[in-house]
Image: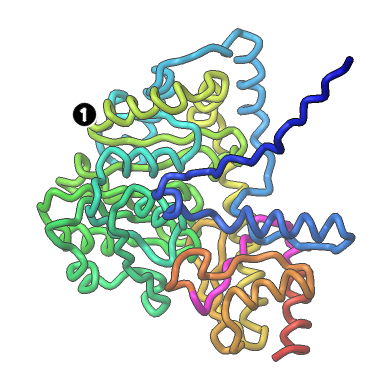
Amino acid sequence: MTTLVRMEKSTPHELRLSKRMSHLGTETAFEVLNRARVLERQGKDVVHLEIGEPDFDTPRNIIEAAVEALHKGWTHYGPSAGLPDLRQAIAEEVSRSRGVTVDSSEVVVVPGGKPIIFFTLLALVDQGDEVIYPNPGFPIYESMIQYLGGKAVPIRLREEKDFGLDLNELASLITERTKLIVLNSPQNPTGGVLSRPEIHEIAQVIGDRNILILSDEIYSRLIFEGEHYSIMSVAGFKDRTILLDGFSKTYAMTGWRMGYGVMRSDLATHITRLMTNSNSCTASFTQVAGIEALRGDQSSVDRMRREFQRRRDVFVAGLNRIQGFSCRMPKGAFYVFPNVMKTGWKSKQLADALLEDVGVACLAGTAFGDYGEGYLRFSVANSLENLNKALQRIDQWTKANL
């Protein structure tokens, strides 16, 4: 005789997330990219100007160095702070480019640039500590500050100052609770660049307060006008600066996931402990390739920068001919950030309409903070042919809808 056992219908257990997960933001570029790809699968032609990624291949000498490293067995764990030879190469490069003396003990290699943002905040910010950050700015700054229970204090980047910041406003935002100030130059999303005099003025406002500066310089080699200047180079600020840089933008190595931080050695020890507890180490063969990137032929960087500048010039000129658009000439990175207030449309609605109606993928300025309302961000990391196609489509849309 067979006995049938009736199974009770299982009830899914409720997912009980930590409260801090509700404070975690996102990076809208990847969301828009996914939406654009859905439209492409449905047969729509889309011009991708949303993602912040060079459209160039990684230089051949770097790829060959990685392949050779794989064949030579660089496939195992390495030190959490990074391979000694790469840390030394980074120390030499930063010493040369920033005009300061950097030791390899002050370098931590991480998988991408974001871990330096995350680890710096983890290491420094307690509940209620204040962090001043640029707005509109890279959204991960605000996201991680809030995730950790810090108080995110935005400082507005002003178009009338070429997307620089107001020094009086900066002074007014600094309090006894200020633990960290985030700077980003060249800047995402505006393409703004802080000049040497502006950096010195910011340093004067900070004075000798015990406040650290996270200086995000990931676009340091992509400058079209003027020079790159770091607050790390200001007398008295090297030991108060955490320099963030990497390989993704300069060498078209976004998928390789390799960045680095340069900071005082006692802080580097704690950032290294965070690496040990999270990623163990950065992939060894990519680090060997990073040595070649820094010490090898740099002509690919120069060619890429010149091409981005050529595209920038064409795209900004084209936007300024379109009804409702006005755009300043960005001095660095590969983004343009036009003012669209005269269209009468909110940024998010306009970005959505351009994607859905005419297949131009861009980002609303509000993806970079509340002060981004009234702006759109376009990446010029696409061919001139596609950039001109996007300009034509935007022009057609505005003529039909404004």
Residue 47 point in image, percent of width and height: 76, 62
Marks counted in the figure total: 1
Q: Residue at x 23, y 33 (%)?
A: 264
Instruction: Answer above or below: position of 120 versus 204.
Output: above
Question: Residue 60, located in which quarter of the rendered image?
Answer: top right
Quadrant of the frame with the N terminus: top right
Q: Residue at x 39, y 33 (%)?
A: 93
**Horizontal placement of 361 versus 81: left or right?**
right
Q: Nearer the viewer, residue 269 or 72?
A: 269
Q: Residue at x 73, y 68 (%)?
A: 360
The reply to whether the magenta stretch includes residue 375 is yes
Residue type at tag 1: Asp
Residue 257 point in image, percent of width and height: 55, 34
Q: Nearer the viewer, residue 177 or 149?
A: 149
The residue under label 1 is: 266
Residue 377 point in image, percent of width and height: 57, 67
Residue 400 point in image, percent of width and height: 78, 89
Span of residues in magenta = 373-388
